[in-house]
Amino acid sequence: MDKLSILASGPLEGRIPVSGAKNSALKLMAASLLCEEPLVLTSMPNLADTRFMEKLLQSLGVVVEWPKGEALCRMHAENISSTIAPYDLVRKMRATFNVLGPLLARVGHATVSLPGGCAIGARPVDLHLMAFEAMGADIVIEEGYVKAAALRGLRGAHINFPFVSVGATEHAMLAAVLADGETILENAACEPEIGDLAVCLNACGAKVSGYGTPTIRIQGVPRLTGARHDVIADRIEAGTFAIAAAATGGNVLLEGAREADLGALIDCLRRAGVTVEVEPKGLRIKRDPATPLKAVDVETSPHPGFPTDLQAQFMALMCIAEGTSTIRENIFENRFMHAPELSRLGANIHVRGNEAVVRGVVKLKGAQVMATDLRASVSLVIAALVAEGETVVNRIYHLDRGFERLEEKLGRCGARITRQGDSA
C-alpha cells in the first residue's frame, strides 16, 4: 500500500490547474445510461473513483472509450445488457448507487447493491428510494440489494425532501427526466454540481429548470440523445489547494477555480488573514508568511454554506492559527476522524460531539499518520507541508479516490512530497 513522505516545504508558489469535479463527473457518467447516443465528457478527472465507475458502466453494457491519462471520455449506452449492479462493483464507492435511477427510468427495473464508500457516517439512501416510490416504482430490499421495478414506466411526482440531500436530489433528477409528466423537487440541494448535471441533461434533450434554487422542475421526455459536456472545475480540489497555499504562506493561482462556487471558504480565508483575488484565469491565493493566521469559527451546511468536504482541510489550517476556533460539523456524523491524526503532529484539538475546538499552536512536528477517509487524508498533507521534519501519510488510497496528480501539482509549486510503495 502506497504512502506519502512529506517534508516541510516553505511557501507554495506557482500555478495549479484545477481538475474536473469528481462529485459531478460521477453523476454525469451515470447519466450516460439514459442516453441512446454517445455522451462525451471533457475535463474528466482521472481518479480511482471515476475509473471504478467506468468498470461498473461497462458491466451494464455501456461502451466506454477513455484512454488512460486522457481527459475526454466517450460513453455509448445504445444497448443496456444488464440491470444488475453487484456488491463487488458498488461496495467501494457510494456514487455507484446512482445507476439505479437511470436504469429504472430507461429499462423499467434494476437490482443494485446498497452502497459503500468512506466511513463518515450512515448516509442512508432512504430519500433516494422515497423519490422513486413517489414516481411509481415498487421497491424491496433483500440480502443487501435494492430491487426496483416500474414496468409501466415512472411518472412525474411532487417530492418534498425532509432535509437537503445532494445525492437524493441528483438521483431523483436522473430518474425524473424520462418519467411521464412533471416532477417537482422541493427542498432540493443547490450545489454547483446539481447545476452541472442539469446543464448536461438538458444538452441531451431533458427539460430541467430551477436548478440552483430549492425548487427544481423536470418535465419528462420520451428519450434522451447524446451530447458533449465539459465537467465543471472541482471546487473541493480548488478549496483544498487554496488552504494549502494559505497554510504555507504562499502565492498560488488556481486555474479554473470559480469564485461563485467557493464563497463561504473565501470569506473564511479572508477573515483568517489570507488574500483572495479573482483573476481572468482563476483565483489567486496568497499570504505573507510573516503575517500570522487568525482563528475563524466555521460550521458546515449545504451550499452556499461552508462545504463539509472542506472541513478537515480548514481544521488543518486552524491548527496553526493564532487563537481558538470552533468547527461544527452539521452534515455527517463521525467526520472528525482526522482530529486524532492531526494531534499526532502536535495539534491541540478537543472534540465534543459534532464540535471540534482547535487551539492554534506555534508549530507542528512530523510524524507517522494514517488517512481515514478521502478529505481527512488531504488535511494531513496540508498539515505536513508546515510541520517540522518528515511526515509519512499512510493508506493514501483514499487520496487517489478524489485528487488527481496531487504530488505533481503540489510539487510544481515547491512542495517536497514523494510517493513510496509499501510492501506491507
Image: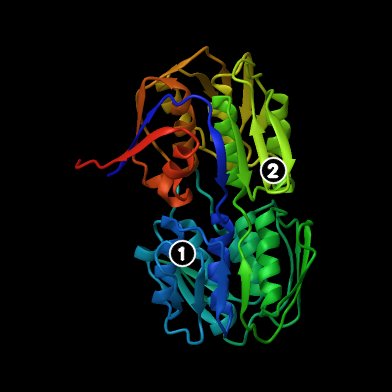
Secondary structure type for disc 1:
loop
Q: Are marks 1 and 2 in contact (CB under 8 Å)?
A: no
Q: Is residue 247 left or right of residue 265?
A: left
**Residue type at tag 1:** Glu
Q: How many marks?
A: 2
Task: Name the residue rendered at 53%, 77% in the picture.
Answer: 103
**Quadrant holding the C terminus:** top left
Mark 1–mark 2 distance (CA, rounded to whole Å): 27 Å
Q: How is the image coloured?
A: rainbow
- Given residues 369 and 216, the one toward you in this image is 369
Crowd band around label 2 with a 10 angstrom C-alpha radius: few (<14), some (14–19), many (20+): many
Q: Which residue is labeled 2 in the image? A: 262
**Residue type at tag 2:** Leu
Q: Nearer the viewer, mark 1 or mark 2?
A: 1
Secondary structure type for disc 2:
helix
In the rendered image, residue 191, in percent from the top left (x then y), is placed at 69, 53
Q: Which residue is labeled 1 in the image? A: 70
- Given residues 135 and 99, the one toward you in this image is 99
In the rendered image, residue 178, in percent from the top left (x then y), is placed at 66, 80
